[in-house]
Structure formats: C-alpha cells, structure tokens
Image (tube, helix red, strand yellow):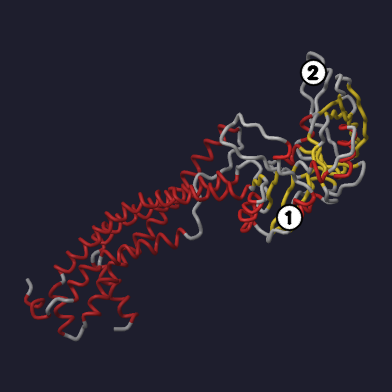
C-alpha cells in the first residue's frame, strides 16, 4: 500500500466518525493545552526572575576580592598575614588561568569625599580603574565618551540623583537632578589625624561621560584613572602604598564567554580568593525553574494520560464495529502490516488533531494570562508593568504536537495489534 493511499484511507475513516473523533480529541486538546500553559508559565517566571536580577549586566565577568580564612567559629580572630591579598603576583596568577582575557584593577578612595556643583552637594563612590576606556569592561556611554584621562571622570547613570541642596528653605520643592555632562565637579578629599583634626584637599574634575544604566553598582560610581586614585589614597594615608604587601581592593576578571565563567571563578576560589559571578546565580535560578517546568509539564501530562485511555477505548470500539471490514480487507490481500498501519495512523491522527487544538487553546490561555497580568501590573506600578507572566519557548509548539501524536500512537498500539492479528475467516463470520 502506498503512503498516499494509506493517508487518504486514514482521513476517510476519521471523517466517517466525526463525532466520536472530536469527543476523543477533546481530551487530548485539554491535556496538551495544560502542558503548554503550565510550561509557558514556568518559562515566564524564569525569564522574569533572571531579567530583573539586580546587576546582571555582564555574565562573562567575575568580581574578585581578597581571600579571608574560613572558620567554623565566628569569634575566631585572624591576622593581616592570614588575608590572601590581590597583589601584582596574584594578578599574574589569575591572568594565567585558561579562559581569562583581561584582569581589570578597581581601587576605591579610602578617605572621605564631598562633591560640590554650584550650591548643590552630593556623595558617590570614586573608583580608580587601570583601563583608559570603560568600553573595555562592557560599559557604554549614554552621553559623552567612556575614555578616561587625568582631571576627567565618567559617571554612572544615577550619580546625578545623589545631589541635594544643603541649605533648603522650608517650602522649597525637591531639586531636579542636574545635567552633569561637561560640568566641573569640585571634589574635596578628607582625611583625619589621630587627634581628629580634619584636613581637606580639593580637586576639579570634568565630567566627560555619563554611562548607560546597567542596574548594577556602576550606576552609582564615578570612574577615574587608577593612578589618580593611588595618589589620593597616598595623601589620605600619609605614606606610599606598597601593592606587593597591601594589594588592591577588587579585581574584575573578564572571560572568553559566559560558558567558561563558572569554571574560571572556581579556579580563582581555589587560589584562595573570593570570586563572585552573576552567571552562577543565573545558572542556579535556571536549574530551579527547569525543575519547575518539568513538574508543571508532568501535571499537564496527567490529563494527556486520561486522554490516552479515551483513545484506546475509541480504537477498541472501532475494531469491534469494523471486524467484518477488516476480514474483507484481509480477504482481498491486505497484510497484517497494512491493517496495523491503518489503525495506528487513525490513533496518531486523533492525537495530532488534539495536539494541534491543544496548542491553539494553550496559546489563547497564555495570551489571556499575559493580558490580565499586564493590566494588573499597570495599575499597581502606574503603567510600568511590562513583564510577561507566560513565555512560550520556541521548542514547545513542536514538542506539544509531537508528544500528543506519540500519545495517540501508543494508545492505539494494543487495539491495532488486535486488529492486525484477527483471523480473516473469523472476522468475516463476526456479527
């Protein structure tokens, strides 16, 4: 029997029993729709959780800090010699790890700082960095440039929000964040003697760039060259800093890709330092939600199991009704494989139709859920709710239809085998 003839015969047989086929397929529709909706709900929760994590802006970077000894007793003290410092030698060891493309030094100002712009004042974190262009650490400029030079700074997107009026009048409205690009900030560096005497040193710094928002710590930082921060810290401490003994505050390690970042972070930890990468957080969240999607999909598959029993029952009844027909087909030359293919095809056809209908129903349910969730978030956040409650993965439509078809095929296997093994003489005698 040709494939075209087989498909035509299967379609004709299903068309003869439209009512029974539709009622049987409804069970598959409900089961498939449940699978699509629940898995999409899990995928939507996963996407929202990972996209809204604070500071997840560069999954190929690792923040490295000095290593402190681990102890089971929180009261146990440790000396300065017990701390694993981020010295130049340590930086060379980290740079030698396979997969590391760049090690960037980040040093913070150790004294107090005060920022003035006309009558306004502000606070912020000053970060010295050993690159001349912040684009090398995946930071982009919203305004101006990302290059660093002496006497110039590049600021994070939220720095302007830190400005305030130190001498407000009782009825003054809140100040608008000032435009800082091109402005000169007067930065007072403050140190205190052992007697508590305060000394100040003032620097004029030109703002040459404002960074694009990252939702990370860089939004609140003011970046300047590392050499300048080293000079500031030497003035604050009153002595020259020996990096071979004291090391640096923090490193940013750039890797080839997010695929190797967790392994590199583990090797840095084995060297005795503290390493944090957003990728490890994302992987942990993804693992949790993957398990959740499997559980959700399993709950939906229970409905498909019930539908499978319905398909088996429908096919069994069809065989009883068509026993003489099967006998006639065998009498005119149909083989057992031909009979098996016909009934398996009909069962798979019911599964396919149910899967297709379930996919459309599941998509409609997801659309309604997103619409309701979006309206609710909009009312709660003043129009700012844009997150999707459900997300249909690209593979889910194909998987759901294929799985429903497979369920139909397996459900019809036992009845089809019974039909294929009928004795033609007995089938012809059947009333």
Query: x, y (%) of residue 271?
Result: 67, 51
Residue most extreme to the top = 170
Give the residue at x 60% y 42%.
Answer: 52
Nearer the camera: disc 1 or disc 2:
1
Q: Count numbered badges in the picture.
A: 2
Closest to the observer: 199 or 146? 199
Q: Quadrant of residue 159?
A: top right
- Horizontally, residue 194 falls left or right of residue 277, namely right
Query: x, y (%) of residue 416?
Result: 22, 71
Residue most extreme to the bottom = 333
- Horizontally, residue 333 falls left or right of residue 103, namely left
Comes first in the chain, label 1 or label 2:
1
Give the residue at x 75% y 56%.
Answer: 102
Residue marked by disc 1: 93
Could you tell me if residue 207 is visible in this image? no
Residue marked by disc 2: 172
Secondary structure type for disc 2 = loop
Query: x, y (%) of residue 228?
Result: 89, 41
Q: Which quarter shows the C terminus?
A: bottom left
Q: Quadrant of residue 404?
A: bottom left
Q: Which mark is residue 223?
A: none
């Amino acid at each position: 029997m040709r494939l075209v003839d087989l498909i035509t015969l299967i379609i004709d047989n299903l068309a003869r029993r439209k009512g029974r086929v539709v009622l049987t397929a409804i069970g598959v529709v409900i089961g498939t729709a449940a699978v699509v909706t629940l898995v999409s709900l899990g995928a939507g929760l996963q996407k929202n959780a990972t996209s809204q994590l604070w500071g997840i802006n560069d999954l190929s970077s690792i923040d490295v800090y000095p290593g402190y000894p681990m102890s089971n007793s929180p009261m146990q003290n440790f000396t300065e010699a017990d701390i694993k410092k981020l010295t130049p030698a340590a930086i060379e060891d980290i740079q030698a790890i396979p997969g590391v493309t760049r090690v960037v030094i980040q040093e913070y100002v150790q004294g107090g700082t005060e920022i003035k712009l006309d009558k306004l004042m502000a606070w912020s974190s000053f970060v010295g960095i050993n690159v001349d262009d912040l684009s090398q650490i995946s930071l982009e400029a919203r305004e101006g440039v990302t290059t660093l030079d002496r006497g110039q700074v590049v600021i994070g997107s939220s720095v302007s929000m830190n400005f305030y009026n130190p001498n407000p009048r009782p009825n003054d409205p809140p100040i608008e964040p000032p435009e800082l690009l091109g402005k000169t900030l007067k930065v007072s560096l403050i140190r205190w003697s052992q007697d508590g005497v305060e000394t100040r040193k003032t620097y004029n710094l030109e703002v040459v760039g404002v960074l694009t928002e990252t939702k990370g710590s860089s939004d609140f930082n003011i970046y300047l060259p590392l050499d300048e921060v080293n000079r500031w810290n030497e003035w604050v401490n009153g002595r020259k800093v020996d990096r071979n003994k004291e090391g640096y505050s923090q490193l940013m390690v750039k890797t080839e890709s997010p695929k190797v970042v967790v392994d590199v972070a583990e090797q840095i930890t084995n060297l005795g330092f503290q390493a944090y990468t957003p990728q490890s957080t994302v992987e942990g969240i993804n693992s949790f939600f993957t398990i959740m999607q499997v559980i959700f999909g399993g709950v939906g598959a229970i409905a498909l199991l019930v539908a499978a029993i319905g398909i088996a029952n429908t096919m069994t009844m069809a065989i009883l009704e068509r026993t003489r027909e099967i006998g006639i087909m065998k009498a005119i030359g149909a083989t057992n494989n031909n009979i098996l293919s016909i009934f398996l095809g009909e069962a798979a056809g019911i599964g396919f139709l149910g899967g297709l209908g379930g996919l459309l129903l599941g998509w409609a349910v997801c659309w309604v859920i997103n619409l309701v969730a979006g309206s609710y978030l909009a009312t709660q956040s003043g129009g700012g709710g844009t997150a999707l409650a459900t997300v249909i993965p690209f593979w889910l439509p194909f998987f759901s239809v294929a799985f429903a078809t497979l369920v139909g095929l397996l459900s019809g296997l036992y009845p089809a085998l019974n039909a294929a093994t009928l004795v033609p003489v007995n089938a012809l005698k059947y009333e």
